[in-house]
Amino acid sequence: MTGFVTIFHREISRFSKVLVQTVVTPLISSFLYLLIFGVSLGEQMQDHRGVSYISFLIPGLMMMGLINNSFQNSSSSIVSSKFSGDLEDLRVAPVTDHEIIWAMSLGSLVRGTIVGVITYLVGAAFMVFQQGEWLPIVHPVATLFFVIVSGLTFGMLGISIAFWATTFDQLSAFSAFILLPLTYLGGVFLSIEHLHPFWQMISKANPLLYLINGLRYGVLGVSDVNPWTAAVISLLGFMVFYGLARWSLKRGSFQRW
Amino acid sequence: MANLPLEIINLRKSYGPGMVEAVKGISFDVQPGEIFGLLGPNGAGKTTIISTLTTLEKPTSGQVKIFGVEVVKDPMFTKRQIGVVHQEVINSGFFSVEEILNFQSGYYGLRRNRERIHFLLHKLALFEHKEKKVKQLSGGMKRRLMIAKALVHNPKLLLLDEPTAGVDIGLREDLWKFVLELRAEGMSILLTTHYLEEAQELCGRVGIINYGSLVALGNTQQIIRQYTQKKVCLTLTQPFDVKSGYSFKNKDLDYEFLIPQNLPLGEFLDEVGIPLQLVRDVSIDEGDLAEAFLKLVNKAELQEVPS
């Protein structure tokens, strides 16, 4: 248990030392997204199921920030440890794979949640400024559920990819070619109801659609998919990536680059 | 009989699709409170052996036991018994020296370990540098930090994988003193090194490996005696026509003979027939581990080369 607490503490200390990346970057990027998409373009968009475009956008951006930061936190922690060589310390020390996975993915969740909360606060401030009203959270329990499951899942995905990566390039290729398109096509910026039925069907194969819409249900009470379906798929994803992370720790490399 | 700190029985390790054997059936042990030297040229298999002790590698076959427990069967137990100083310096860019040692303690289940950490920082002359990041430390300080990290949990068996590589002679001697102190406190130590004088100075027993096989194992002094010759240099008062079965070199009045280690000097002088009154000066070089090592490694290389 002490091993778990230590790794978790180490993860929190690590991202606390790069506060600009952790806090300022998401603050600026969510401000820009909301300004351009929410305010400028949003005025030309119709309300979706009774919610304004800017409020529709906020949970999408929250989930995007949460997913990216959770993934990046664990993956960059492992990759930088591979680079400096201290990942081998973890293999040599008496800590279990479970401790490593839970501690690292909880660290990812904390960072992802900070970014998600910052995005929410910036979004709510925009709402107050534009519409004169605060953005309340309609289903707090559902919101909490989707935040926790998504943060942990993407922390675990980050662990899995980082243990297999042999160069920085491979890691950024995964982010750029897989994670980013799936996020953008998962309904962050628009409802899939506006798509052609064929693309709607394709979109439903994208697991991120369920996380994004799950959180949108939690915050706004509206969703393109059934929230229970979203919850079940999220939990399945969590289990799959936990297994993948365990496999990566067994088969992947702790060795120095 | 009490369990040995380390016991390796017929260890084999193969790599890659062709299953190239890096370690070919090696057996040796480390006795309680001894410093055992594992020596060999680059690529001989030393680091592979260390990696099987630390679970970074799994043996292909054979047994590795730490205090009687097989590493593959109960790695959590065996990991707690050992401290490892890796061959390469680890950087840990984000954290200070003290933070690194705190985290390292936590990995070993020690949440509050301030006393031990401060003791090690003082002992290894790092206390004034405890707030610094690794990249701000000198090469010698980095090495000392690696040793402090390996000792935070007070291990019973210390694995030193070339701890003095690239370290200047002054610091190397300080580290030797520290290693001898650790042994005096009862720690058992497995040392791999390229510096044969280091092994000769510190290790009661050594094992020499080459191409993954053990080519010599035993008491350091016995190995030196077995695989080296005594060099006897005689300075005479006048030239003498030497008729010796032993190889010798002659320059002016200096005669240098290579004779077996067990041949007493008196008998040798009788054999070569040099009268004692012609001898102005004598010096004897007993041979060292480097000479024995080269002989063993070269012999193994000749056997390895296919005809």
Image (tube, rainbow, N blue to C red):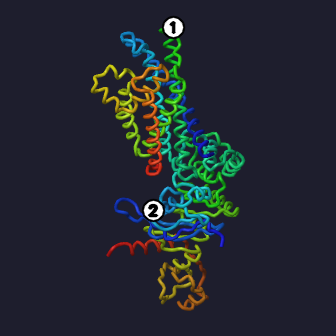
Residue A138, position as x, y percentages in the image: 52, 19
Residue B208, position as x, y percentages in the image: 51, 70
Estimate how packed mark 2 is, as few (under 14), some (14 to 19) or many (20 or more) residues with alpha carbons within 10 Å: few
Give the quarter of the image for residue B66.
bottom right
Please, which residue is most extreme toward the right here?
B115
Q: Are marks 1 and 2 in contact (CB under 8 Å)?
A: no
Q: Secondary structure at mark 1?
A: loop
> Which amino acid type corresponds to the residue marked 1 in the rendered image?
Gly
Give the quarter of the image for residue A179.
top left
Horizontal side of B189 relative to A22 (left or right) equals right
Name the foreground residue: B29 vs B183. Answer: B29
Q: Secondary structure at mark 2?
A: loop
> Which amino acid type corresponds to the residue marked 2 in the rendered image?
Asn
- The structure residue drawn at horizontal position 60% and vertical position 80%, both measured from the top left corner, is B281
Find residue A208 and name its label. Answer: none
**Label 1 marks which chain's residue?**
A
Name the foreground residue: B157 vs A175. Answer: A175
Q: Which residue is mark 2?
A: B42
Residue B14, position as x, y percentages in the image: 41, 63
- The structure residue drawn at horizontal position 48% and vertical position 58%, both measured from the top left corner, is B57
Is A60 above or below relative to B35? above
Is A26 above or below relative to A161? above
Is B201 above or below relative to A74? below
**Label 2 marks which chain's residue?**
B
Q: Which residue is mark 1?
A: A132
The CA span between labels 1 and 2 is 72 Å
Judge depth for marks 1 and 2 and give the one in front. Answer: 1
- The structure residue drawn at horizontal position 45% and vertical position 34%, both measured from the top left corner, is A232
